[in-house]
Image (cartoon, coloured by chain):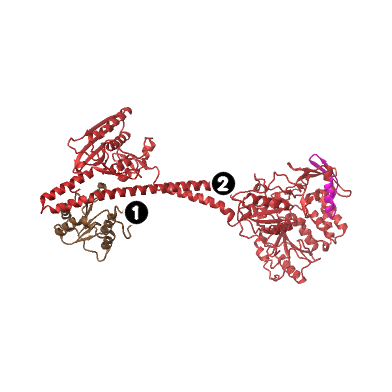
Amino acid sequence: MCVQDWGDSITASMGEQTRFTTKYLVPQWLPPLVSWVILAAGILCCARWIFAFTGDAAPVVIVMSRSLSSVLPRWDYDTDQLRFVGTVTEPLCDRPPSPEPSRQQPRSVAHCEILDGKVKVVPRPRLKLGVDGSEVDAHRFRAWLVDSERRIDDGWPVGSATVHGTELELEPVPGMDAGLMLQVLRTTPLVFDSNGWPAGTGRYVVEDVWIRRTSVSPVPVGVPDSIHDYLSDVIVLRERTGRGVRAQRLVLVGLGSYEAPVAQALSRELDTEGLHLVLHVEGEFAKGIAIGRQAVAPWTLDQRPADRVMLAAISFNEPDPCRSELLRALRCASRNPGLIQSVGFGPAVQPFPPSFPMARFQDVATGCDAAVGSDSRCGVVVLTNTTWEDFADRLATAMTNRVDPLVIAVRPDVEDVMRRSHAYDVSLLALMDDFEPPAYFLYSNLKSTAWVDANTVTLARNLASSEAQGRLDAVKWERFLDDLDESIVALASPVSFNAVNHRLQGTDPSIRFLDPQLRLAAVGPGTGWIVLGLLLTVAGIGGVSYQSLRRRARAGRQRLQAQVDYFTHEITAPLATIKAYAEGLVPFQPDEARAIEAQANEALEHLDRTQLLFGTNGIVSLQERESSNLGDAIRPALSWAAGRADGMDVTWEQSVDVPTDLPPITVPAEVLGYVARILLDNALKYRKGERAKVRIEFERDRATVIARFQDWGEGISLSFADHDLFRRGVRSAEALRSNLPGFGFGLALCREILSRFGARIDLTSRSEPTEFQVRLPTVSARKGGLR
Amino acid sequence: MILFVDNEPVRIAPWVRAFEAAFGEVKLITDAQQAIAFLESEPRPPVDLLVWDLMMPTTGRLTDEETALGTRTGLVVHRVFRSRYPKVPAILLTNVRDDALLARYDSATDRAGRKDRLTPRPAIALAREMGVGGGEPTE
């Protein structure tokens, strides 16, 4: 008989050759470990969900901008959760193509073109022109235009408007060029909100929502600058829905001269963090907000590629010594061709809102000795791109040696400037807008400068109109620049500048600023985590409880066994002592002593024939053991095995030797029969070929009978540890691969059951033959003597 | 010196008297904790044979876990004894009917038997066989 099973790293063998290995189906340490791991995972999931609300709040950055599509790339904010319905604040008409193909064209509401002296407006797909949320008809649109016209200081250029389906046809007022009108439509929002800020062209459709909720991306929320009421509603709504916003910090960022005060006011109202940026921020910069958790603030210009022009401007209000210092530094810098290509001087300007004090301009780090004193607050450095380089250069040339102190420094590489930015110690770096054509830029500045004469403004407007139509006469433009009295040029209009926050500390003490270490996180962890967490927690608690119950059950069995041992001990001990005393009396009173000893032996013999039983009701009882006849015990098992072999078409050879003089054993016949059946079944399973040969021998060994179960099957490898053979739930890999029936409990049960009757099973030979030896106590074993 | 460790002095008395008559000095300790303290004391007591019981009350630093609720307290005593007297013979005398356990103690230095079978006279014979008294002590 061969037994193949159930040990850790067990191998079975045929002869000396190792054939296969076995492993535990379930290692004993695994269930409790898995239970604890599941429980820990569940608790972590729940904790993650809970701490998302109660932990250190991550900010939600709400970016307010006029041209959201360029600030917040769409692919970052597409979502299926339509939480925000914004208001379009973009200009009505699309802008001319960017001179830098790599740059993303700002999205506008409609495509516009000049046709027969009129501007034809074709809205983008899914958009409809509307006023106050309603679609417009020609009458209402005209009324809207008139209403808007009153709000624009230099007059609205639209003479009449006609609606054709979803398209709009605009005719300029007499004297107004269609090109200029188009230019205005390209840059000027058409609607004003209740605060008087330009708010866009109407309600925005819900298809475009600028929020994305994800665990790895920040949550910049793009909302237009007129979203004040909307935002309040949305925030209340989100608080109500318990998505975690309540615990989040709201950071409002106004990207533009219009949006910045709105953001500031809203920040104060909502008692949250606020940061306002002057003027626009472009798409590349916006990635600083959107990319990853770390890239939030401060933002730098490094992300903006291409060449830039650096403009240095000095306020009218700057004290003369300060201007002189700055100019001296810039002139010094200009002599270093590796740093600044050209330097020009022009009228003093203030291109920034009054709320921004001038930045300090300490040192241009040119290697020159000259440096502005640390206490001076003299200049602002402005960067712009190549679109403006030529214009800036011309402007600088035109202004050179005329009026101090406008300084235009043309820089080929903004990154180089940024590398040296620490030396500049500027508080504001601004970018001029790519998409603002130079003539229109100049016009928009001139028209808002009070002391510019009307002829100059008209001339600039005409040039801008020509420029919008792509017909800008270079000669006229140069002549205009040459004739321009730069002393009256005030770049006070911020419309055409994009600005990037850079070390804004100190610009407005009423505003708290973004912590540079701030990291953005998702609005909330979502319900998936809490559901998963609860499921895992319940599963983990179940597993741990099950393990605990198993331990308690095991401890209970141990206690029960201890009680059995105590009872047995207490019953036997007095008799053993009496027997010992009697033995001491033999030399003195031999007859009486032997009589006492015989009586004690009789009592002990009776006890050995009994077994202590604990009923399920806790009642202890003594039950006399029945002695078993060995032949009767194993006969049914042999018959069963022979029948089974016959059914399997296996040749069954058995040889049984039961001496007639063997004493009865204390193990019940049913138990021995069960053991024999398992061993014979294994012999059948792990036979060699189609033949199974077994031999069963019995032999008396003092107080025991030894039963030897032998078979000539595949054998058991030496790598099997004896104790592993008798462990539960272990099967050989070979048995598993061969789909042999069984669960790996046979031998373990044999040993366990036999041990309850004082018997024991051991492996005594691994192959040729494989032999299991069962030591069976006999009924007469109690009669004293040494073991 | 023959050391007996058994918590029931009356019941072990026949063996104690017999061993005293056969080998001379006998010391009986009736508490497992005291026995451990005795075995661990310095200098090491001169013990020629340990006769120990299996089931004894758990006292002192002994725990229910290591003594199986007091049913195997003697195992701890024996372990301490073996750590200090690796070659000195020891005989387990018990009324516990656990043949598998008793079978473990069948070596040159260890034997085991039930008290109803290993009465004083066979026990003394076994001790002599293990080198105590008349035989050559193993250590």
Residue at 74%, 43% (x, y): give it. A127
Q: Along the horizontal axis of the image, is A704 left or right of A101?
A: left
Q: Residue type at mark 1?
A: Glu
Q: Is residue A624 left or right of residue A259?
A: left
Q: Position of residue A482 (x, y in %)?
A: 83, 59
Examine the structure image and report whether residue B1 is included in the region drawn in magenta.
Answer: no
Q: Which residue is mark 1?
A: B65
Residue type beneath disc 2: Gly
**Tag 1 secondary structure:** helix
| Residue A782 in view here | no
Between disc 1 and disc 2, the foreground one is 1
Q: Which residue is mark 2?
A: A528
Residue B33 position, x and y percent, is: 29, 60
Query: Mark 1: few, some, or many residues within 10 Å (few <14, many ≥20)?
Result: few
Q: Which chain is red?
A: A
Start-end of magenta stretch? A142-170
Confirm or deny contact between disc 1 and disc 2 (CB under 8 A): no
Q: Residues within 10 Å of mark 2 (few under 14, many from 20)?
A: few
Quarter-wise, where is residue A446 in the image? Answer: bottom right
Quadrant for residue A385, please give it: bottom right
Q: Are marks 1 and 2 on the same chain?
A: no
Classify the position of the C terminus of chain B by image quarter.
bottom left
The chain displayed brown equals: B
Q: Is residue A567 left or right of residue A514?
A: left
Q: Nearer the viewer, residue A438 or A567?
A: A567
- Gap between marks 1 and 2, in whole Å? 44 Å
Nearest the camera: A35 or B18?
Answer: B18
Instruction: From the top left corner, tell me how far across and down residue A439 is, in percent.
Output: 80, 54
**x and y percent of residue A745 in the render?**
35, 40
Depth order, front residue of A371/A755: A755
